[in-house]
Amino acid sequence: MAEKNYYKVLGVKAKFTQDELKKKYRDLAKKHHPDANKGSKKAEEYFKIISLAYETLKDQKKRRDYDLKQSYSTRSERTSPGSSPRGGNRSSSKDGFRNPYGFRSSQGQRPEDPFTNPFTTEEQAFDPNMPIRGMDLHFMVDIPFKTVVLGGHIKYSYEKYVNCDNCKGTGSSAGEECSVCDGKRQVVIQTSIEAKIPPGVADQYPIRIEKKGGEGKNGGPPGDLFLKVQTKKHPTFKRVKEDIYAEVKIDAKLAQTGGEIEVETLDSTKKIYLEEDTLTGEEYRIPGLGAAIQWGKKRGDFIVKFMVVNG
Ligand SMILES: [Zn+2]
């Protein structure tokens, strides 16, 4: 059975709600249920495809795998006249996370395409040897607090498609379908990268690493890798734009008399002088020890917030 476009089968666009999906599926399932079609073989087959499409698209993980697979098997832009918008997806990948799964809405279906016949194998119209750029990959990555605010490096492991070694990305070896990639020309590998985290990068910022996405097919260029910053919580520090806040407990007696205390900062520790009669909520600002700004040229402030405790 040839691969079907599940979005087309169910008549949904790339962006759909679970409710929409469920409704489309129910309508179709009712119409094509084998019981309602006197056991027609075709209806049965069709019903199976509808069910499979629904099972796949409603599940986030399955959908992601499907999209990934589809982008390899069907992402060849056709060159027929009037289809230019389909080729225009390249630039959309630059704006990052509209498309967290690297799914391209242009692949395989135009949103305005009416639901026609799911048995159409549109893929056959594509030139399988056309060079195709590799996939852009988007991942959300948990990054330690200090690495985000001061910059640094992280090691990140991920999976990507690369050309099959066995068939050199041709899909066949010794005149037969390659048994390693099943003729798909590419295989998934686990890889890792040391990524530079720019100092003071904003939370949720997509860091772009060129050419570290999926390998291109048929000599096409590789895609890019985007790592979206998810700042890990720090047990005592909080970031407010370029400033770092730290709550520090001080003994009531010391708060009354004042004196020198040592506080932990982002970099190391710092001795600061506590004034007499310090109250809970009072702050001590240390300039230049906050988060990096202007990509590391400057830094914000480090602000100690006192909390007076008895004991
Ligand atoms: Zn192969």
Image: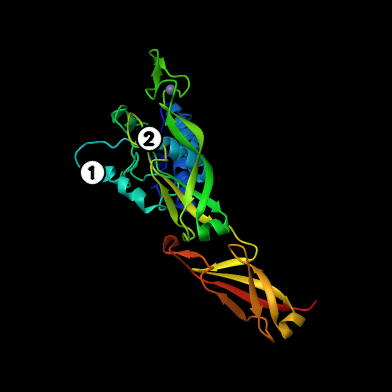
| Residue contact between numbered discs 1 and 2, judged by CB atoms under 8 Å | no
Query: What residue is rendered at 67% in x and 71% in y?
Result: 262
Query: What residue is rendered at 48% in x and 61% in y?
Result: 200
Type of the residue with mark 1: Ser
Position in image of residue 261 (x %, y %): 69, 74
Q: Which mark is residue 84?
A: 1
Secondary structure category for the residue under label 2: loop
Secondary structure category for the residue under label 1: helix
In the foreground, 199 or 144: 199
* Residue behind mark 2: 118
Number of other residues with Cα within 10 Å of mark 2, as a class: few under 14, some 14 to 19, many 20 or more = some
- Location of the C terminus (image quadrant): bottom right
* Residue 237 appears left or right of 63: right
- Location of the N terminus (image quadrant): top left
Position in image of residue 68 (x %, y %): 44, 38
Label 1, label 2: how many angstroms apart (C-alpha)?
A: 24 Å
In the foreground, 232 or 59: 232
Position in image of residue 248 (x %, y %): 67, 72
1 or 2: mark nearer the eye: 1
Render colour scheme: rainbow
Q: Residue furthest right?
A: 311
Number of other residues with Cα within 10 Å of mark 1, as a class: few under 14, some 14 to 19, many 20 or more = few
Position in image of residue 257 (x %, y %): 73, 85
Q: Is residue 10 visible?
A: yes
Quadrant location, ligand no. 1: top left
- Seen in the picture, residue 296 relative to 28 is either above or below; the reply is below
Query: What residue is rendered at 46% in x and 38% in y?
Result: 66
Type of the residue with mark 2: Pro
* Residue 144 appears left or right of 213: right
Query: What residue is rendered at 44% in x and 23% in y?
Result: 165
Of the two numbered discs 1 and 2 on the same chain, state the one appearing first in sequence: 1
- Seen in the picture, residue 225 relative to 178 is either above or below; the reply is below
